[in-house]
C-alpha cells in the first residue's frame, strides 16, 4: 500500500508507514472577511530524523517531507485527518518523445 489515511487527536500522536506524527498545532483562525481558516502543525519523526510540516486550510492543504506527501483532509479543533502517500509511488513513468 502506497497511501493511507490517518486521524490524530489534537496533541496526540499516530504512526503510519515508518513515521510517527504528532499534532502540535491545530487552531481555527478567522480572516478579515470572517471566513474560517485552519492552521495545523505536525511534527514528524522517522528514526532519528525529525521535521515539521504546516497546513493552512483552505489554501495550503498539501506538504512534503522525507519522500512522503501529506494532504490535509479535514478535522476540526479536536482532530486532524490526513492522507499520507509515498512520493513517486503513484507516478507514471516519463513518456519518451
Image: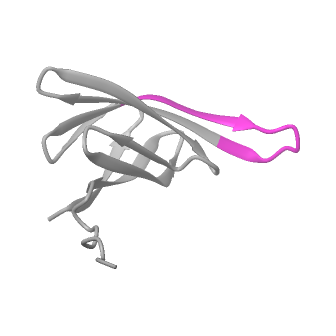
Is 13 on the left-hand or right-hand side of 55?
A: left
Outermost residue toward the front in this view = 97
Residue 75 x %, y %: 49, 50
Q: Quadrant of the C terminus?
A: bottom left
Which stretch appears magenta? Answer: 23-37
Residue at (37, 43) in percent of width and height: 64
Q: Is residue 15 above or below residue 52?
A: below
Q: Is residue 51 magenta?
A: no
Which secondary structure class fits the magenta region best? strand
Q: How many marks?
A: 0
Q: Quadrant of the N terminus?
A: bottom left
Q: Is residue 39 above or below residue 75?
A: above
Q: Is residue 15 above or below residue 74?
A: above
Q: Nearer the viewer, residue 80 or 65?
A: 65
Q: Nearer the viewer, residue 45 or 14?
A: 45
Residue at (64, 51) in percent of width and height: 58
Residue 31 x %, y %: 80, 39
Is 50 on the left-hand or right-hand side of 46?
A: right
Q: Is residue 30 magenta?
A: yes
Residue at (24, 61) in percent of width and height: 3
Residue at (38, 27) in percent of width and height: 52
Residue 54 x %, y %: 48, 34
Would you identify the image quadrant in which residue 46 lies? top left
Q: Is residue 30 above or below residue 95?
A: above
Would you identify the image quadrant in which residue 83 lies? bottom left
Q: Nearer the viewer, residue 32 or 94?
A: 94
Amino acid at each position: 500500500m502506497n497511501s493511507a489515511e490517518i486521524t490524530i487527536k489534537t496533541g496526540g500522536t499516530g504512526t503510519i508507514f515508518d513515521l510517527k506524527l504528532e499534532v502540535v498545532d491545530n487552531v481555527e483562525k478567522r480572516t478579515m472577511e470572517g471566513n474560517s481558516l485552519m492552521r495545523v502543525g505536525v511534527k514528524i519523526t522517522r528514526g532519528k530524523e525529525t521535521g515539521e510540516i504546516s497546513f493552512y486550510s483552505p489554501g495550503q492543504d498539501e506538504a512534503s517531507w522525507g519522500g512522503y506527501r501529506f494532504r490535509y483532509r479535514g478535522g476540526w479543533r479536536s482532530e486532524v485527518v490526513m492522507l499520507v502517500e509515498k512520493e513517486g509511488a503513484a507516478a507514471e513513468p516519463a513518456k519518451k518523445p
